[in-house]
Image (cartoon, coloured by chain):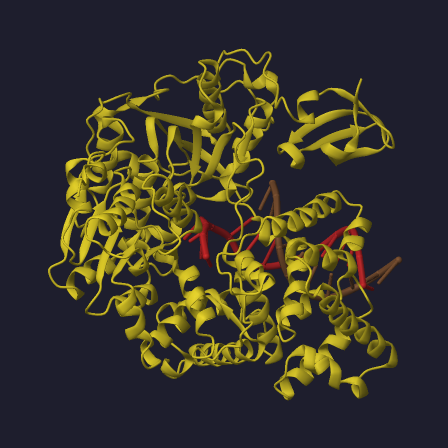
Chain colours: A yellow, B red, C brown
DNA sequence: CGTGGGCGGATTTTT
DNA sequence: TCCGCCCACG
């Protein structure tokens, strides 16, 4: 058989990895070295050359995005139908297995999944239920403890109570939380993995069945696996299947949430004669950028070892900018972006990367003033929005009455006279009789006043009615009916504050999402499939994602992405590396890997900036330049404004950026003229300082603009009415 | 029952 | 500085 089409587009190292013998394999894939390509071509190799049935292949990733990308590439590039393969995230695959084997797993057929927020609410409820002080027992920390145990594969019964009272109480809380989840028929994210792992090991025949089926198990981003994920994989592979693992120890940046880089080495020990391949040729960055990245990461101990190289040229030097303060830094970045655009580059070619989210604000102000559209990644995702979760809670109650989290969320939304008192009675009853809130609501009539009983009755009838009325309807009509008949739509219509309208739009979008939903698993009821989908795939905002905007995000969320121009900002000791990681070597090494990840995002130009003075939490900090800066070889760096040149910025330290100031000496001398904020939104019609008229508030002056598209807001000082923020889309302002 | 002001806390994030 | 949470008030 002719296999040249599989190997032809690959370099030598990639070829070796793709065509490796059917033995345990580790591919150390450097940043930008064609990792996904190797994975997809390996699948093709297995099927077309080794004659492996697609049915026998399992490919696991961390994010839905990576899974979708892989599925897409296998279908289009390789022309294989991807349906018979199992491709998914750890959580997605475990979910699928638990749906298939809910009986063996001891779960109700319609079990639901708690997201992080749901989990925290539930934990909080349990803490209160045990009459504990929730200042001492912080819900966040307690759920963190629970998750950490589950990630290690530990149940409450496995935990040693060593006499430490804090630990003792935490174990009790873990146990209570477990009991509640069981009673409610819900599982959290960590539970999906742990429960799946347990049934594979403990249910007779089940592990054997899947080991016989999945002869090839491929795992992406292996350096991010935690203990339970690693053990799960090991169980699934057993001694008969072939693991094929891809990762990069230098890009392990999730130790703080349980990931163990050591799993790479552990894997080499646990599976004998693991073949090791290194992908070191980089197709993304220039030589200088790679040299800098290699030099930085070279300071870490215990690496498996790898050196990125490129056949492209050295490229531009790394440009280092020392700012006076965070505003000076933002001004510099804005000016450079403006230059790039003026030379015909796209706005989206530029990425501003920072260590912590709070840093985005100053950049936003300056980009706004410069009328350069931007997008900040990492806000609330669609299915995490309040109104969406409200709607989902009704839908979840319809499929599972015992879901207390959902019950509590909407029992009084919109308000129907069920107050804290009533709920307290229900909670007490539910605790005492070990029943769900729903069940308790039927049994508490003697303990409640007549008014409470009738209000509660109205709610119970409503849910039953919603259930009955949506039976047999297509999914999107079910959703539409529920948001209308539950009163949610009416509730948000009344909410005249600026957010109400946006929430209504989101609810409508939920109906559209339901209309367009195509379940992968056809034997599940559509509503249940949709609800699971909503939790497991919380939904990147698609709407405005493709507009040409400057990209702003944390270093963590930049992993896996690439940009022609990267601004690595805020390189100050204490901020990056972060104060809380500076103490121990492991923490510091992880920060260094984060820095390595940041550098290797850049394709053509890498700017590194730091500020001598930075205002954080309302106080000025004077941090030394990050130690990582000193780790970049001097000959690769060009300082943009050397220290000797002591020109101070002309604006006063307290001034806010305005278009005029942003172009004064000290910044760039490029003209602002003619660049409208965004041509296709109403924002383009208004400028700072412009006079406008509002039907109700009268005349005023535009103070500032914020956000993009449908989210754009405008701040106006009205004569005699004060300052108001308005949603630009609804404000109906006229320019005067 | 809903809101406004006072208080404390403020890496990083996916599923 | 800013945001989210809690409690007190209307």
Res A584 visible: no
**Which residue is at the front of the view, A359 or A267?**
A267
**x%, y% of residue A51?**
21, 54
Q: How many marks?
A: 0
Task: Give the vertical position of A260 relative to A446 (above or below).
Answer: above
**Which residue is at the front of the view, A498 or A702?**
A498
Task: Give the vertical position of A504 relative to A138 (above or below).
Answer: above
**x%, y% of residue A423?**
73, 75
- Classify the position of the C terminus of chain A by image quarter: top right
Res A51 visible: yes
Q: Furthest residue to the front?
A: A1
**x%, y% of residue A660?**
60, 16
**Which residue is at the front of the view, A398 or A374?**
A398
Query: Which quadrant would residue A74 be assigned to in this image?
Result: top left
Query: Which quadrant would residue A274 be assigned to in this image?
Result: bottom left
Q: Residue at x 15, y 63 (%)?
A: A269
Q: Furthest residue to the left?
A: A273
Q: Residue at x 34, y 80 (%)?
A: A202
- Tell me if A261 is positioned left or right of A564 in this view: left
**Which residue is at the front of the view, A65 or A517?**
A517
Q: Residue at x 75, y 82 (%)?
A: A442
**x%, y% of residue A701?**
76, 24
- Tell me if A559 is positioned left or right of A512 in this view: left
Task: Give the vertical position of A713 relative to A669 (above or below).
Answer: below
Task: Give the vertical position of A95 relative to A180 (above or below).
Answer: above
- Classify the position of the N terminus of chain A by image quarter: top left
């Amino acid at each position: 058989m002719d296999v040249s089409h599989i190997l032809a587009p690959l370099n030598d190292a990639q070829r070796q990895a793709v065509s490796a013998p059917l033995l345990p394999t580790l591919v150390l894939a450097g940043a930008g070295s064609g990792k996904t390509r190797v994975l997809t071509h390996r699948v093709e190799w297995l099927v077309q050359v080794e004659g492996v049935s697609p049915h026998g292949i399992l490919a696991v990733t961390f994010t839905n995005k990576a899974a979708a990308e892989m599925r897409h590439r296998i279908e289009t590039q390789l022309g294989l139908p991807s349906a018979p393969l199992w491709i998914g995230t750890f959580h997605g695959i475990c979910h699928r297995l638990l749906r298939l084997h809910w009986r063996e797993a001891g779960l109700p057929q319609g079990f639901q999944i708690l997201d992080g927020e749901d989990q925290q609410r539930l934990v909080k409820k349990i803490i209160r239920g045990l009459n504990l002080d929730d200042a001492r027992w912080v819900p966040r920390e307690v759920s963190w403890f629970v998750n950490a145990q589950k990630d290690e594969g530990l149940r409450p019964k496995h935990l040693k109570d060593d006499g430490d009272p804090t630990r003792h109480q935490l174990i009790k809380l873990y146990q209570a939380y477990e009991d509640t989840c069981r009673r409610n028929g819900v599982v959290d994210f960590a539970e999906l993995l742990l429960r799946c792992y347990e049934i594979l090991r403990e249910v007779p025949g089940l592990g054997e069945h899947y080991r016989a089926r999945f002869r090839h198990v491929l795992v992406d981003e292996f350096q991010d696996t935690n203990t339970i994920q690693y053990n799960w994989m090991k169980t699934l592979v057993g001694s008969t299947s072939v693991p094929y693992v891809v990762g990069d120890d230098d890009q392990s940046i999730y130790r703080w949430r349980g990931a163990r880089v050591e799993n790479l080495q552990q894997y080499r020990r646990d599976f004998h004669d693991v073949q090791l391949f290194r992908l070191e040729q980089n197709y993304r960055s220039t030589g200088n950028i790679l040299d800098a990245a290699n030099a930085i990461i070279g300071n870490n101990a215990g690496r498996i070892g790898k050196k990125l190289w490129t056949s492209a040229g050295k490229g531009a030097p790394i440009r280092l900018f020392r700012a006076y303060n965070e505003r000076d830094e933002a001004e510099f970045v804005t000016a450079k972006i403006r230059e790039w655009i003026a030379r015909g580059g796209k706005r989206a070619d530029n990425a501003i990367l920072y260590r912590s989210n709070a840093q985005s604000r100053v950049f936003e102000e300056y980009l706004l003033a410069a009328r350069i559209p931007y997008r900040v990644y990492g806000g609330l995702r669609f299915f995490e929005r309040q109104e969406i979760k409200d709607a989902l809670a009704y839908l979840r109650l319809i499929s599972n009455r015992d879901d207390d989290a959902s019950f509590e969320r909407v029992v009084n939304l919109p308000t129907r006279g069920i107050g804290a008192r009533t709920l307290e009675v229900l909670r007490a009853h539910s605790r005492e009789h070990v029943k769900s809130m729903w069940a308790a609501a039927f049994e508490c009539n003697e303990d409640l006043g007549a008014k409470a009983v009738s209000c509660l009755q109205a709610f119970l009838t409503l849910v039953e009615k919603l259930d009955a009325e949506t039976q047999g309807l297509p999914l999107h009509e079910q959703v539409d009916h529920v948001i209308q008949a539950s009163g949610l739509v009416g509730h948000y219509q009344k909410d005249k504050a600026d957010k109400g309208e946006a929430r209504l739009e989101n609810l409508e979008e939920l109906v559209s999402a339901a209309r367009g939903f195509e379940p992968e698993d056809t034997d599940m009821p559509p509503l249940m499939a949709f609800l699971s989908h909503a939790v497991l795939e919380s939904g990147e905002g698609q709407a405005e994602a493709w507009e040409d905007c400057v990209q702003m995000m944390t270093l963590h969320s930049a992993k896996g992405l690439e940009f022609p121009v990267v601004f690595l900002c805020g390189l100050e000791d204490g901020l990056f590396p972060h104060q809380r990681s500076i103490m121990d070597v492991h923490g510091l090494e992880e920060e260094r890997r984060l820095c390595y990840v940041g550098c290797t995002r850049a394709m053509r130009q890498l700017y590194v900036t730091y500020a001598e003075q930075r205002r954080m939490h309302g106080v000025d900090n004077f941090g030394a330049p990050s130690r990582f800066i000193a780790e970049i070889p001097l000959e690769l760096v060009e300082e943009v404004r050397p220290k000797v040149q002591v020109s101070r910025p002309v604006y006063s330290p307290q001034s806010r950026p305005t278009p005029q100031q942003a172009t004064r000496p000290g910044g760039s001398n490029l003209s602002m003229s003619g660049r409208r904020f965004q041509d296709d939104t109403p924002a383009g019609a208004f400028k700072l300082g412009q006079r406008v008229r509002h039907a109700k508030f009268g005349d005023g002056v535009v103070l500032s603009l914020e956000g993009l598209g449908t989210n754009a807001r405008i701040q106006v000082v009205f004569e005699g009415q004060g300052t108001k923020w308005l949603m630009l889309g609804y404000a109906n302002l006229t320019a005067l």
